Every structure is written in structure tokens, then in C-alpha cells.
Image (spheres, rainbow, N blue to C red):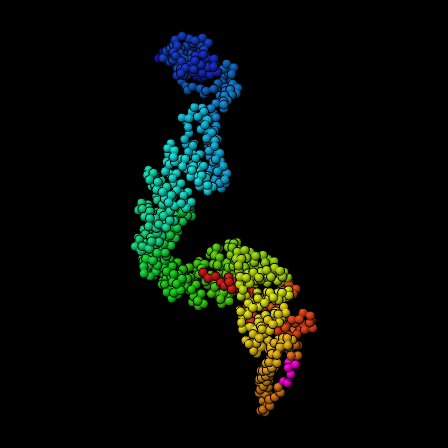
Amino acid sequence: MENVHLSEEDEDLYSGYNNFNPAFYSEELENDEGFQQALRTSHGRRPLMTAQLPGTAIGGRPLASSFGSRVPLASSAGRPVTGAVQDGAPRPMTSIRAAGYSSTMMRGSTFDALGQHRGPAPPLEEKNEDTPEEKIKILEKRVNDLIEESCMAHSNGASQLALEKAKEARRKEQALVRQREQSGTADHMNLDLTYSVLLNLANQYENNEMYPEALNTYQVIVKNKMFNNPGLLKVNMANIYFKQKNYPKAIKFYRMAFDQIFNAPKEMRIKIMQNIGVVFVRMGQYSDAAMSFEHIMRESPNIKTGFNLTLCNYATGDRERMKKAFQKLISVPLGIDDEDKYIPATDDTNTNMVIDAIKNDKLYQMERDVKAQAEKYIMTAAKLIAPAIETSFASGFDWCVDMMKASQYIELANDLEINKAITYLRQKDFNQAVETLKTFEKKDSRVKSAAATNLSFIYFLEKDYEQADRYADLAMNANRYNPAALINKGNTVFIKQDYEKAAEFFKEALKNDSSCTEGLYNLGLTYKRLNRLQDALDCFLKLNAILRNSAQVMHQIADLYDQMDDPHQAIEWLMQVISVTPTDPHVLAKLGKLHNNEGEKSQALHYYSESFRYFPSNINVITWLGAYYIEAKFCENAIQYFERATLIQPTQVKWQLMVASCYRRIGNYQKALETYQNINRKFPDNVECLHFLVRLCTDMGLKEVQDYAIKLKKVEKAKEIREQRVRSGRESSSRGRRGSREGSAGVSTPVLTSPMKSSITEDVKAVSQPESKLISPLLDSGRDSSNSSRGERRSGKNISLPASNEPYESSSPKELDADYVDPLGPPTERPKTGAKRVVEDNEFADEDLGDDLLPE
């Protein structure tokens, strides 16, 4: 207690705070030989010393504690004892001061915590890259960089660059091995680096389809006993043999890998066994494949393997095995939760927010995809085996439905029954299909809507539009958001020509399903009927963006441009149609017509000829080609087309007359005479044929001229009598009506006319001055007279069939208008226009692809 002093009132309590202990002055440690020697010792501390060392930082100054004096510390960096009193002065009972802060300047220096006054640190020693160790490290780093660059190039799709990098890495690795051998460090080889280089090189060979090189590289790895897990690489080798369709070797290596990786995870072994089953399927060994799949179903069942097992048993025709495989398929657990957890069950706002957040997250999407894939496999398997497992497909479907109702896929049972009805449709058993679908009228709304939609479709195809409309309404009432039901309803309204209302239904279907292509197509047709051509064009252009290669859509666009007086755009779109369907004769004929209207005869000839080559029965195309060659003075080429027209329409005499006329034009009078004689035998009352027979026989000096003249006279008299009777009947009926109106009771006396008296010469002379007309060879295919006039303005001159009575002597221009025969026959024999005209204008759309509505 002698060293404990109480502070007096006048004593400074804070004295001594700034006293500095030289032991803490670190700048002099560099000059402290004892401290530096301690740093250089192996244990980092100095041996104990008993004497003072002159020149040290502390100078041998003794330090005392509160318990008495002690000897000086042995270490030059000795720390003063806590609570020590220097020079006999008691230490205040307070904490030590903060390091570095002082009220007075000690030894003339300032506080420098970072030691910046010392100057920069000495530079690092440069590595000597000439040493073998440094060279080896640099090479190893370069090889690793090349492997990484090769993998990145492959991930970016640059397979060739990836292969080049892999080869360069292999060359660098070989140089590294040689350098190790030269430096005597071959025992320290980096086997992991060698393995990585070879494996990457083999993979890049495989990615570039260089299969022999890849197999050789894999063999180098497999044969080296220093590498681990060679069995896994045999799986890669088996995959290559599979790609090469060398299935026996693929199975061999798969089995070797399966035997060598017995310590591998179970999933890996299951995948190898599944590959073995797939190879057996490719080889047609379905029994062996079924054994592999059955092994997997016992160990780790999954949907895909169960489906494959069902297919293999179906291929073998074993009914019992098919049933067992199907039962295993529908019993596979999916491992996903029930969708009820995504339905808000409480009024808790936070819980509902969480449910909304997880309703469309990636996990839910994955679960939905897994369930959809499982349902797809199960439905496909059921539809496949149903006709095969029982004596009739109906019994097979019933068995599958019963199995599904007892499994976790109860919802699929109704879908399978609908597929049963569709199968009836494919077999054209419409009554059974309708009866099956009608059983769903009392079931839940989803199934009821689907069944009613199919029923509406069936009745629409059968043209029972009332029933189709009824079931379309039923489907809509069951599910208003069913786009197929709305489309069927729109179709029934379209048939009733209520186009505005039909457009509303098609629009509603598009609102419910923006990807409904049937609704968009039918909406375009509806606008077309309403003459809203621009709206129809917008619909078909949108549809073309969805269905890029649809010939129907592109042809509708071309037809709309044609109606909008834009022939160049119409031709461009028809050319796109030809690029998709190059053999469609109606599109080729349409192109020929457009080019003909534009005055491009050579292009029109090309497309009309192509159309005739693919479909030599289009009478309009035949007529145009025949008229073109007659106008071009190549009558011998026109003969084949008119002969084809004769085969198509054997009851039309005009085509046979045109054939005979062509023979006259080319100067083959004998052939022309024979042709006219054949026509006379088939059509003995044809006046034009007899006229030409009389004229030909007269010019050729044949004896048969008198016989044909007499026949001509009789035919003309009979024709005149028929015409006179017709006129008399009309006049008497008109007089009778007039007399009845006037109230006359008198009897009118009929007017008798004397028979015509004319000689043979007069008959022949009368024949030589018929009425001359020009008839277009093609029926007017426009929608109205304005379209026809537009075509005339474009072409300037339409190709027309010449009169079959044009002179066969080219030097007789005075007979140019003589002996004309209307090539289309008398007006009563001409084909009807009207509805037929619309078909010809849109032959591609109305006949092949059709303006028909697309039912759902």
C-alpha cells in the first residue's frame, strides 16, 4: 500500500497523460539490432538477456510497477507493465490514452498511421520466365484457356471454330508433356489436364459429325488405365454408333457401360437401359425392347417408358401385355401437387397475393407441362390399343375408359369417349357417332361443350343447318368462351347470308382465342361477301403472317387485289402460291388470264400451257390455247386442243367443226372432208356441217355433192317449218289474249304460208352469206360487266375463236366473212354463266381451296 497515493485537491489529476514511453516508438525498431536479430531467428524471438544493450530504444531505463521496482525487461521491444509508475510518480487510475494522439509533439514527429513518410515500397522481384517451372505453368494456363474457348465457341454455334481450338489445345498439351520430360518432371504430369483435352477434342469431333475421329479419341482415353470412369465414355461411343445406325455395336457398348458403372447413380443406369430399349426398337426387336422397358418400370417407372412399353406390346400383338402396360402407364405417379392449392380458399389478402404470385411461376408451368405431356401419352396409347385389345374397337374404348375412371386421370375418360365418337366418324358410321356424342348433353359444361361442337360440325357437313345451329347454341351456352362453338355458330349464320351477324361471331371467337386461324379466315371471307375488300385484305394479311406457307390464304389475297384493280400485286401473290404448289392448274390458268389482260401474250401462253399440262380438261384453257394458235396462224397446233375439247364435250358439235376448220386452213381438204362426214353421221341435222360438205364436194368435184345438197334442203325446210310453227303458236296465243281482252266472239282464220321454193344453187348461195359475229373464246370471268371492260382495256384485243367457215384458200380475201359458224354453238347450247361465272373467276378458291367456311 505504500505505492498507493490519494490525490490531493491541488494535484493535477490529468498530469502525465502525454508522457511518451520510448518502447512504443516504432520508427527506431529498424535500428534496434536485438529486434532485427529476433526477427531473423527461426522462432521469431530473441534469447533472454541480463545486461543492458547500449543504443537501444529504451536505454536500459528501469520500469516499476505498483507493487515495487523490477528489473528492466529483456526484450528491446518490451512492453511496460500495466499500471507501472515511472520516476516514483503514481499513475492515475484511468484508461490508457488513444494510440497516436498527443497534446504535445514528441521527438519532433507527427502521427503517421499509414507510414507514408517512408516512401514507396521496394519493387517486387520479377519472375524469371526462363525457368522450366515457369514455362510449364504458362503452357498449362494456355491449354486451359484453349479448352474454355473451345467450349464457348460450341455454345455459340461455331462448331468448326470449337474443333480448331480443341486441336490446338491438344497440340499445346503434347508440347507440355515433352517439356516435362526434358525437364525431368515427367512424374508430375497433370493427368486431369490431359483427360480434359482429349474429352473435349472427342466431343468436338462428334459435334462436327467426324465420327471415326471421335471414336479413335475415345479409344485413347478408354485404353489408358490411368484415367478414371472409362465406362461413362463408352456411353458416348454407343451414342456415336447409334447415330451411324450401327445398332449391334451400340447395344454392345451400352451394355459394357451398364456393367462397368455399377457404382453410378441409379438414374444413370436407368437412362442407359432406356437407350438399350430404344436401339432394340430401331432394330425391330420389340420383345427385347419390351423386356428393357419392363425392367425400368419395375425400378423407376416414368411416363415415357410406360408409353414405349405399350407401343412395343402393340407391335407384338399381345393383348394381355398391352392391357398390363397400359395399366402401368396410368399408375405412374407424376409427383406434382393438386391444382386446388392455387385456388384462393380464404379471404386473407396476403395468402391470395401469394397464390396469385405462384400461379404462373416457372414451377407451376413445369408442372403443367409435365401433366400435359402425360395426358398426351396416355390418350395416344389408349386410342392406339383400343381397337386391338378387344374384338371391336367400341369394347376396347370402353375398357380404356373404365381403367381411366379408376385412376388419377378421371378427366381423360370423357375425352376418350369423344375420341370414340370421332373414330365412328372416320369409319363413316355417323349414326353411332351422333348417339355417342348425344350422351354428353347431361354432363359437365366442358365435356358438353366439346360434344355439342362436334355434333354441330357433323350436322353442318351433312347440310342440316337447323341441327347445326341448335347444337352450336348448346355448345355456346355450355361454354361461351369456346372459340370452336362460336365459329360453328358463325358458319350457320353465314349460310343464312346474315353476314354482319356472322362477322360478329367470328370476331368474338378471335377475342377468346387470338390464334384461332379458322375464325380469322372465315372473317375475311365474310368481309369479302360484304364487299369490304380492304377489311378482308387486312384479315388475310394477318393470317398470312401466322400461316406463312398457306396456299389458300395467299390465293385469297391475290383474288382481293384482282378485285381491287391491282393486277401487279395479284400476279406477285399468285407467284408465291406457285412457289408453294407449283402444279396447281387453276392458279396457273389464273396467272395466264391476268397476263392476257395485261397484253403479255407470251407469258399468258406459258401459264396456260402449264395449266393444260397438269389438268388437260379445263375447257376455258383449251379454248384460249386453240384460239391463240389460230390467231398465230399455227392451226396444226390448235387441232390437238380442239380434239381434246371434243373428248371432254362429245355432244357439242362446235369443237368438231373447229377441228375440221383447222384442217381446211392448213390445206388438208381430204381430212377436213372426212371430219365433216363424221360430224354429219353424228349430227345429221346440223346445217353448218352440210353447208361445208356441199362446198367442199363442189370444189373437189365429188359426186356426193347432190346427196348433201338434197339433205341440206330437207334440213333447212324442216328447220323453217319448225320456226314457222313456233311463230304461228306465238301469234295465235297473242291474238287470243288480245281477243279475250277486247271481248270479241269471232273466230280468227289462221294464215297459211306456202313452203319455200329454192334450188340447190340458191341454197348454196344462201349459205355463203351468214351473219358474222366475233365471240370471245373465254367466258367472261369477271364479277360484273365492269371487270370485263377492264380486261378489254388492259389487253387491247382479246383472242377470239375464228369463224370455222373462214376460207381455206388464203388467196381469197373476198370470202373472209363467208360460211361463219358460231364456235360456241347456238345460243340455246351455250353454257350457262351466272353461278358458273363466279366459279371460273375463283376457280382455285371456290373449287380446290374454296370460299368454303372452315368449320371447327
Relative vertical location of residue 59 with respect to residue 178 in this rendering, above or below: above
- Above or below 372: residue 186: above
Q: Which residue does the image show at 53% across and 63% down from the upper left? A: 615
| Quadrant of the frame with the N terminus | top left
Q: Is residue 772 magenta?
A: no
Provide residue 82's location: percent of width, then percent of height. 39, 16
Q: Is residue 165 left or right of residue 629?
A: left
Relative height, residue 239 to residue 762 (above, below) = above
> Between residues 595 and 765, which one lies in front from this camera angle?
765
Q: Position of residue 294 (x, y in %)?
A: 32, 48
Comparing 490 with 400, the one in front is: 400
Q: Inspect this view and state whether residue 112 appears.
A: no
Which quarter of the rendered picture does the C terminus lie within? bottom left
Relative to 231, is 759 on the left or the right? right
Give the magenta-colored segment's residue range.
Answer: 756-763
Residue 93 is situated, as x and y percent measured from the top left of the image, at: 40, 18
